[in-house]
Image (spheres, grey):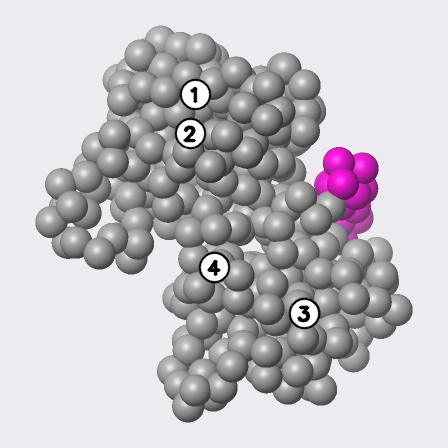
Amino acid sequence: MRSLIDILDFSVEEIEELLTVANDIIDNPQKYGEICKGKKLATLFFEPSTRTRLSFEAAMYELGGNVIGFSEANSSSASKGESVADTAKTISCYADIIAMRHPKEGAPFVAAQNATIPVINAGDGGHNHPTQTLADLLTIYREKGGFNNLTVGFCGDLKFGRTVHSLINALSRYSGIRVVLISPEELKLPSYVKKDVLLKNGIPYTQTTSLEDAIPELDILYMTRVQRERFFNEEDYLRLKDSYVLEPKKLTNAKKDLSIMHPLPRVNEISVSIDSDPRACYFKQVLNGKYVRMALILKLLKEAGRI
């Protein structure tokens, strides 16, 4: 059974096919309004979420389907000690496809091994967030027209940021990509990502603690929040949470066609005064996320023979 657990589960060609379908949904929404009629998406969210969960739900409703599920672990049988494997087997009896978010890395993989329907990883701990990456890729495609020859700056929490790890993985398969890693020393990109992705694929990268120094060379600036929920120590979080705040004056030397992205939620790392800047793309990302999740649901249901 085909699932999406890691962005690398799909080939470059499959991702481009998904983006083509997503663009067609944007242009011709009426074509897709009843394609999933009678089908059910189960949203199994063991961790809080606003955008991702509602985006999946909106996607399924706009395809004509229905949604069942839960939005916190203590409202599921996990609170009674049920395993992820048993939950997946059970939900397979009720639904046609699963979107799962879980605080433990690897939980959606376990679900996919035990489900008899497709499973979509909607975020697992600090590991992966492939559908956010698809939303990011659709945004980059619509803003830049492609993925080659881009200098991409990742700023903020690069240690725990699963969206950063997934997007770096995805971009590593294109040519002419340069990466600039902007973070405090304590939140640097994990060495395994540098070794297994950047070095392995020959992608040039630089590391810096200065956002101002990096901005002039960037085609894309991918901001992230410092994630309170990933810290074991509140003091460390409070010390690092305001490491980077993007304000208009910091864009003085930025490219006129810079694309400013953020997976959201933001706390205060992007000033609201940036929202009206034409280079701000983060709310476009939210909308693009719905369209690309619609395309993904269609692809997996078709491959499973359910539509």
From mark 3 to mark 4, how far is it between C-alphas?
Answer: 14 Å
User: Which residue is labeled 3 in the image?
Assistant: 113
Q: Callout 2: helix, strand or loop?
A: strand
Residue 154 image label: 2
User: Which residue is labeled 4 in the image?
Assistant: 105
Question: Mark 2 belongs to which amino acid?
Answer: Phe
Which is more N-terminal, label 1 or label 3?
3
In the drawing, does residue 210 fall left or right of residue 35? left
Q: Is residue 51 visible?
A: yes
Query: Of tags 1 and 4, which is closer to the observer?
Result: 4
Residue numbers of the magenta segment: 11-29
From mark 1 to mark 2, how far is it between C-alphas?
Answer: 6 Å
User: Which residue is labeled 1 in the image?
Assistant: 180
Magenta residue check for 117? no
Question: Mark 1 belongs to which amino acid?
Answer: Val
Q: Is residue 278 visible?
A: no
Which is more N-terminal, label 4 or label 1?
4
Question: Is mark 1 in CB contact (under 8 Å) with mark 2?
Answer: yes
- Residue 172: give x, y in percent of width and height: 61, 28
Residue at x-position 64% and y-position 46%: 7
Query: Of tags 2 and 3, which is closer to the observer?
Result: 3
Query: Of tags 2 and 4, which is closer to the observer?
Result: 4
Which is more N-terminal, label 4 or label 2?
4
Give neighbour class at mark 3: few <14, some 14-19, many 20+ (Cα, 10 Å): some
From mark 3 to mark 1, how far is it between C-alphas?
Answer: 36 Å
Which is more N-terminal, label 3 or label 2?
3
Residue at x-position 54% and y-position 42%: 166
Using the image, determine if residue 112 lies above or below residue 87: above
Question: Is mark 3 in CB contact (under 8 Å) with mark 4?
Answer: no
Q: Callout 1: helix, strand or loop?
A: strand
